[in-house]
Amino acid sequence: MPDASPPRGTAAELAASIAGDIASGALPPGQHLAAQPLADRYGVSRFPVAQALRHLASQGVVVAEPRRGFFVAADAVARLAGTTPPPAGLSATYFAIAEDRLSGRLPDSISEAAMRERYGLSKGALAQLLDRIAAEGWAERRPGYGWRFSSVLTTPDAMGQTYRLRQAIEPASLMEPGYHLEPATVTRLRLVEQHMLAGGIETASADALYERGVRFHEAIVGASGNPFFLEALQRVNRIRRLLVYRSLVDRRRFWRQAEEHLAILDLLQQKRQAEAAALLREHLGHVVESLEAMRPLMEQGNRGPEPTDTP
């Protein structure tokens, strides 16, 4: 029997994050919600994942199947419509850290004590956030003293470099011998894009928007059967996340992206690989153009703290 008592702390945050991703279409109906992948995705342990899933099951948002685990309910989005999510909590702090880093208000190196004081966090909450940040590749623990933040992806130029790399490897993956995208995968990806065009672009969290794009591109590249293409893309996706969040402020470009995603799926479904590869290369080029247009916004942080900021 699912636990109907409201979750607290990390489990409450996690339940809200999972619900948000379900509402946005990033976790579509029927999706298996395995504990370890969810723990990796949100940077937590398996224990709060289980608590969050039991709570969502009590609300009918997910379904618990004996000996199979939890799955997103068929009517999950309808059930979530009109509900008010709990306060953002750790998610808000995560984005505050990301923005402070991009804005130059966080130094390259900082102690955990200074982080706890700056953001008003407990040791446990900070550990969860830093574990997530480390997994995403923009910070690493310093031996014996605090954490060091990466400076690799804090500029639009670096962001453009990641997309040019993707332009080289992603279209090539579609031309691999034996390329095969499962019909069920096409259906799942199509539903997410249709949900985005139906209004999800405006309501999805930054996390959900990012994950939706990651899942689309990793799914079509993974269908190549060549693990080297997929591993290269996954590595790029982990380390580019930080700067992407600032680019999500302007969501107008996502309408075009969703339409292009659907067009790429149409071509792949028709086995027109060369045309799909050409459209994918053009699609990634459009993103580079959009990033250039947003360069002033993305460069805000490189000028250092505002005069009103305190040390």
Image (cartoon, rainbow, N blue to C red):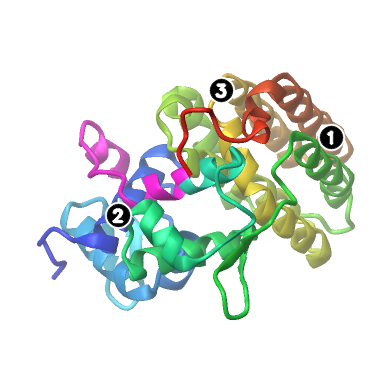
Q: In this rendering, is residue 250 above or below 205? A: above
Determine whether the residue tagged by mark 3 lies in a helix, strand or loop: loop
Horizontal and vertical percent position of residue 178: 84, 59
**Amino acid type for the residue under numbered disc 2:** Glu
Instruction: Give the extent of the magenta segment.
Output: 74-96
Cα–Cα span, label 1 and label 2: 37 Å
Residue named by callout 1: 281
Question: Residue at image x 69%, y 33%?
Answer: 266
Q: Seen in the image, is 278 located left or right of residue 98?
A: right
Q: Earlier in the sequence, mark 3 or mark 1?
A: 3
Q: Seen in the image, is 81 located left or right of residue 140?
A: left
Determine whether the residue tagged by mark 1 lies in a helix, strand or loop: helix
**Amino acid type for the residue under numbered disc 3:** Asp
Residue named by callout 2: 13
Question: Residue at image x 44%, y 41%?
Answer: 25
Cα–Cα span, label 3 and label 1: 22 Å
**Amino acid type for the residue under numbered disc 1:** Arg
